[in-house]
Amino acid sequence: MNEAQQILDDSVNRFFNARIDRDFLTRIEASHWDDALWGNLVDQGLSQVLVSDAHGGMGGGWLDAFIVARACGKHALPLPVPEQLLANWLQEQAGLAPHTGVAGLLVAPIPGTALSGNQVTLTAERVPWGRRADYFVGVTSASELLVLDTAAARVAADANLAREPRDRITFTAAPILARARVALPSDAVRALGALLRSAQIAGAAAACLELSVKYTSEREQFGRALAQFQAIQHQLAELAGAMASVDTMAATAAIAMDTRGITAAGRNALFEIAAAKCRASEAVESITRISHQVHGAIGFTYEYDLQFLTRRLWSWRAEFGTHGQWGEQLGQIAIAEGGAELWHYLTA
Amino acid sequence: MNLDALRFPRHELPTNLEPLRSDVRAFLAAELKGYSPLVRSNSWDGVDPDFSRKLGAHGWLGMTLPTAYGGHGRTALERYVVVEEVLAAGAPVGFHWVADRQSGPMIARLGTAEQKRTILPAIARGEACFCIGMSEPNAGSDLASVRSRAARTSDGWVLNGTKIWTSNAHRANYMIALFRTDSATDSKHGGLSQFLIDMRTAKGITPRPIRDLTGRSNFNEVSFVDAWLPLDAILGNEGDGWKQVTAELAFERSGPERYLSCFILLTQLVEMLKDRASPAALAKIGAEIAWTATLRNMSLSVAGMLNAGLDPSLQASVVKDLGCHFEQRLPGLAQELIALEPTLADSGIDFQQVLGNLVQLAPSFSLRGGTLEILRGIIARGLGVR
């Protein structure tokens, strides 16, 4: 991280710190939205980090996006900032000016059969905050970016374990507002969503670690703080290692995205992204297990903050690909390269 | 708690190091042609003085040592590239390993002009084998309780006591050993000093090889009976032994050897699964590939911090902790996915032999250079709970 990125990290965390607390998170689990905070963070440019200067953005790269997404995870932000970052970036990659308003992100590639002239008929599953979307963005299996109108979209509300909206959107002859070829693989949304979720998992893991250290340092049993027991110290050390591994690999993937991208054939950032999401999703088990264990029963209550983080971690583990799915992809790469070439591939 | 202390700043190796990497690869490909996977799986337990000398002749040992003393004045990152290539290939680095990794840099930092002049050039040539006299029969993880004593006489030091688990003591030219030089001090960490011992000339030092569970003898019990050393055999400052040893261990805990010991087993496993990997098996292999990439980037970050003159001892402990778990998990995973028995006999299937060797060596990975329990204590201190 350079100095500007350090400042970005500090200021985003300060911004969320001042605005997100237990009451807010509790309230938004029922309302699913907060106009004031959304407006505020759009004004601050947080959702425009990847948007070029020409379109009024920050002109940042994926490491900047990683920093913002990590802060979102750390504060359990219940709004679709990472999704908006990605939707804006995709539109610019296709040569479009990002539309205004909340973007609904279509995770799976849109099959060619869904297109008919300038209309789309499609059922999209688990669209983050789909009910709030002002427009939808997706990439077709032929690598064409589509911007879809909400007029012909029917919403069936659903949510993940953290009560973040994950809606089914049914498009029936929905008009295409804009379309353009994009130099990305058709599953780019899944890959870049995985990168952002890895960053969010890193942030939530850091918050779990902070809470766990704080709680075990304050809570006394047998006449001393829990953190003074070696059995607890070693669990905290394991938690710290898990957090650090997720954080390092996710940052590595973001930088790989900045330097290699995922467009060129051969060894590109898809490898680092796969490794990052595989590691992040796998780590959710030990991060949530240890955090809850050292907190005892209080951490299992709704009144305590930990559950806002761990329910997100369990949800994000599966979103944009599980560790099993990304692991399978990495396993296929390893087999295709062969044992003798594996080291060369890893260091390429 | 300050999470920044746990950050691993991203470190990208400069691209101008790629020619160096290619050179090392070409050298290793030619040099290790006849080495079986079984032999390669010994990596830093494998001892071959000829190989070490050749590596030295290419300028790939003592790389960071000053040129005035036969070193090459190169960066820690250049050394990192050489070391990761050598380890990934499974080259026999045991003869020069300790000298190149920690003894050389320590002598360069703390040694007298005479010590540097006589020893550093030999390290850079790959002709010096060092061993480390730290543990004792009653002082292992609790290293500060060493009882071996060095008594000052009018013309030198007289050493008495026993060191144990001393790898390569029976073939080493030199030992750097921790002795108590002042027993009057109240502080447990005070009164300790390090000695630089020429094993070939010192009298009264007897290494006795200890068989390990594989049946081989790489480590030793070393007895000191009125062993006499000249006054200038002390390394660094009298009484600074604890501080010096702590700094030395940071070198020992930071490198790519902390996750590459079982890399060859991963490559063998990938070969075995060709054309017959189930999706579940692929996912398991893939998770370890993700770990390999993660640990390499964490390890690179530590190398970058060392190169920048920072103190990454906390991060190094994290890497070693995670790296050991990774290395120790692989034999079990290999056995889960491939139903062939481990063996050291020539079965005609390399996988079986590599597994047979590494499954037995693996327990040592989390013991050498500080047990996992010690490392986790260091991490807990970094978290502010200890």
Image: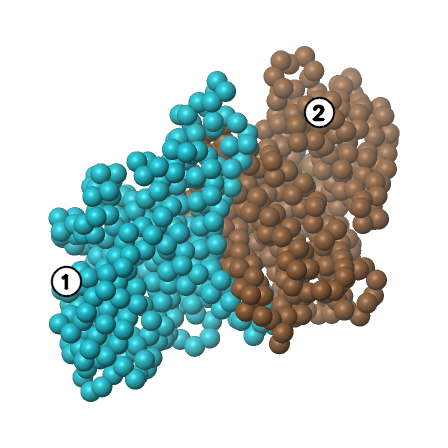
- Where is residue B295 shown, x and y percent of the image? 53, 53
Amino acid carrying label 1: it is Gly
Q: Is mark 1 on a helix, strand or loop?
A: loop
Whether residue A165 is visible here, answered yes or no, is yes
Q: Mark 2 lies on which chain?
A: B
Where residue B255 sits in the image (x, y, percent)? 58, 49
**x, y (%) of residue A243?**
44, 46
Q: In this view, does B305 lie above or below B340?
A: above
Residue nearest the viewer, comparing B344 with A55: B344
Q: Residue at x 44, y 33 (%)?
A: A296
Residue at the far front: name it.
Answer: A156
Task: State the residue at coordinates (53%, 50%).
Answer: B299
Which residue is nearer to you in this view: A310 or A7?
A310
Task: Identify the mark at residue A101; answer none if there is no mark.
Answer: 1
Q: How crowded is mark 1: few (under 14 residues within 10 Å), some or many (20 or more)?
A: few
On screen, residue B188 above or below B170:
above
Residue B22: quarter of image: bottom right
Q: Residue at x 80, y 24 (%)?
A: B160
The residue at the far bottom in this view is A117
Q: Which of A58 and A33 is in front in this view?
A: A33
Q: Which amino acid does label 2 sit on?
A: Val
Q: Is residue B108 above or below residue B292?
A: above
Q: Colour of chain B?
A: brown
**Position of residue B326 measured from the top left corner of the image (x, y, whole percent):** 59, 52
Q: What shade does chain A have? A: cyan
Few, some or many C-alpha atoms within 10 Å of disc 2 (few <14, some 14-19, many ≥20)?
A: many
Left or right: B82 as drawn, with respect to A296: right
Tell me where residue B320 sits by quadrant. Answer: top right
